[in-house]
Image (cartoon, grey):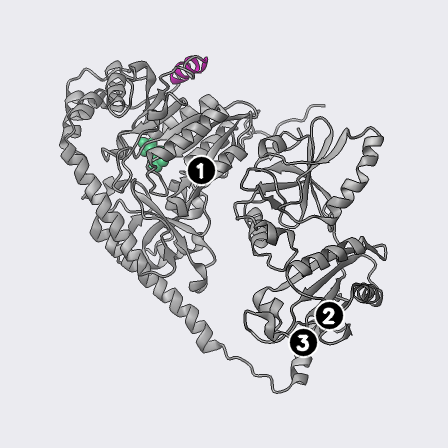
Amino acid sequence: MEKVKESGTMNNCEVETPKNITIKGIISLLMQSVDEKCDRSVISLGMGDPSAYSCFHTTPIAQHAVVDAFQSDKFNGYSPTVGLPQTRRAIADYLSRDLPYKLSSDDVFITSGCTQAIDVALTMLARPSANILLPRPCFPIYELCAAFRGLEVRRFDLLPDKGWEVDLDAIEVLADQNTVALVIINPGNPCGNVYSYQHLKEIADIAEKLKILVIADEVYGHLAFGKNPFVPMGVFGSTVPVLTLGSLSKRWIVPGWRLGWFVTTDPSGKFMKTKVVEHIKKYFDILGGPATFIQAAVPYILEQTDEVFFKKTINILKQASEICCDRIKEIPCITCPHKPQGSMAVMMKLNLPLLDDISDDIDFCFKLAKEESVIILPGTAVGLKDWLRITFAADPASLEEALVRVKSFYEIAAFEAEKAVYSDFKVHVFSSSSELLERLHEKWSLVKKQPYPAMYSSVYGGIILDPAIMVIPIDDHMVHRGHGVFDTSIIYDGYLYELDVHLDRFLRSASKAKISSPFPRSTLRSILIQMTAVSKCKKGTLRFWLSAGPGNFLLSPAGCPTSAFYAVVIDDFSQCKEGVKVITSTIPMKSPLFATTKNVNYLPNVLSVMEAEEKGAFASIWVDNEGYIAEGPNVNVAFITQDKELILPSFDKILSGCTALRLLQLAPKLVEQGQLKSVKIADLTVQEAKRAAEMMYVGSTLPLLPIVMWDEQSMGW
Ligand SMILES: Cc1ncc(COP(=O)(O)O)c(C=O)c1O
């Protein structure tokens, strides 16, 4: 029987609203948290709307053009949906001034601001399973628009240390046959970058190679004041079709006039040949563009605006950006990795440990709004947590005042942080070792189940069962210089799995690290077996280390008379069996000597896994400098191709995994059974790897773990 609807509910009206943060949304929340009782005025460095400040004023030419168009009484009717012909012509001519070819009016579509041009671009490209490559950080409207249009978003990083250039390698890794376009914002919001001709060319070449369009958001076009002049992406339109998005909003300081454009900069007609253009025209039939009289004013505005007006804006922006960067230098918790060269915004990194009681960028911005009535956009809103986006399109006096307030906010928070240390905190001095032991035992007594049932230390010369004294001397060369090697074996059903293979690799690593064992191999083996037996652990992990040993704190181990051997049993072995998501690591890989030696310097590995976790992934994959798949942070990777070949990358530059070797020994059985065609070690490019039917991590603690997503791409579908 059909369920009777509750009265008042409507059929098919359940909708999911995308949860994306928008700039306007977060700024209005920040505004609400300003203390109303505070008599200081609110200064907003949050929005890219310079018209709020009196020093930024549009040109009288633009105002007169609009007034004339309005008063002519000729432009009160509808315009053609794609825009007035004279407006399209004027924008085509305006953009053609900087291009090596001429655009036609048909290339230009008039939109309600650049925002609507973004919507048109993404709507026209969206189709089931399509994806788009967006920069991180990015103007958030792109992601919101993609969410509404069901377009999958994949992120490539902009690199702060390289002037926020596009991570070109990431583009190649991210793109697949369903990628429709990549987006660049130049001059950049939120980073203030202005890309060189060379970098734009590299972007065009990659896009051409991958057969994807470039969407060039040039809403800040010409607002460049650094070493690179503004070069429109359309210059490379013959290499790759470009959708150029722009508006009057920023260059003419009239964001409220809502006059923008969507332009196909595609002289070789690659894009025009497709039916997309027909599609675009039709789509415009449902869009209401800007008011007809504003459109009618455009030809006069574009042709008559004086260079002096543009120069004035550029000069104020340059001066404002300099004030911003100089004042920020006086605020230790904020650093600017790259001085802006254009647009109206800059990204600054927050150093949170310097502040008391501030958990992240959002917390910082809300407290700043409340305490100092200054509005700054948290980096999270543009995709970078614990960064800030500062809009410097403000009059110099307000900017100075806002940054003085940020400094004072910092000083109070930093003072509180120091006060917390100095006033409430007194370092305890233990009067005796028994007092210390008592304290440690007290701590361990609170733990339900002791996780480390046994440890061996050659320094003690025996097995320890008391977790309170499972320690390594601080003057051990492994502790203060990282001069140590290690290995891990699994305890399964009371057996040590592949112990000999691990022990052999352990001693090979020790020899490369120039550490001689204090005992022969047979003694090490016996210690590990006896200690595991004493621990009574049946399912867990056995970890062991060889170190240059205790001695002194110098760099050379010459002062460490005896090397040391340590081992511990960890009573925990939980296997993850669900397929996981991985990312390509941007942390530099270790060089072959250090990657093939299993030494304790795992900082790159730690950063790599942290990067993955920050991006919601389980772990990462390194790709070597020749573009071949390398390894994960503590696992190997294996692939099964569409032809049922099992392939593992070669071990020349990576750690030869004991589990990976075991897999290579066992897998030929699957060949005999007809489940695999062959098993081999080979170099695999990212493109080849991404076409694999299956992908997995291989490592002692797994031992096999399916990978179902890689850099936002589903694997093996
Ligand atoms: C990168 C970027 N694209 C598009 C827009 C929207 O432009 P408009 O105000 O013309 O809609 C903005 C506005 O700040 C922007 O920063």
Q: Position of residue 71 (x, y in %)?
A: 15, 21
What number is the disc on residue 518? 2
Under circle 1, the secondary element is strand
- Residue visible at 32% across and 53% down? 374
Mark 3 residue element:
helix
Q: Give the Cα separation between the discs numbered 2 and 3.
A: 30 Å
Q: Are marks 1 and 3 in contact (CB under 8 Å)?
A: no
Name the residue that disc number 1 marks: 135
Above-or-below relation of 111 to 550: above
Q: Quadrant of the C terminus?
A: top right
**Residue 573, image quadrant:** bottom right
Specify whether residue 675 is painted magenta: no
The three-letter code of the residue at mark 2 reads Pro
Which quarter of the rendered picture does the N terminus lie within?
top right
The answer to whether residue 56 is seen in the rendering is no
| 38 vs 147, nearest the viewer | 147
Q: Is residue 589 visible?
A: yes
Circle nearer the N terminus (1, 3): 1
Instruction: Left or right? Give the position of 331 relative to 697.
Output: left
The prevailing secondary structure element of the residues shown in magenta is: helix
Name the residue that disc number 3 marks: 440
Q: Residue furthest bottom?
A: 431
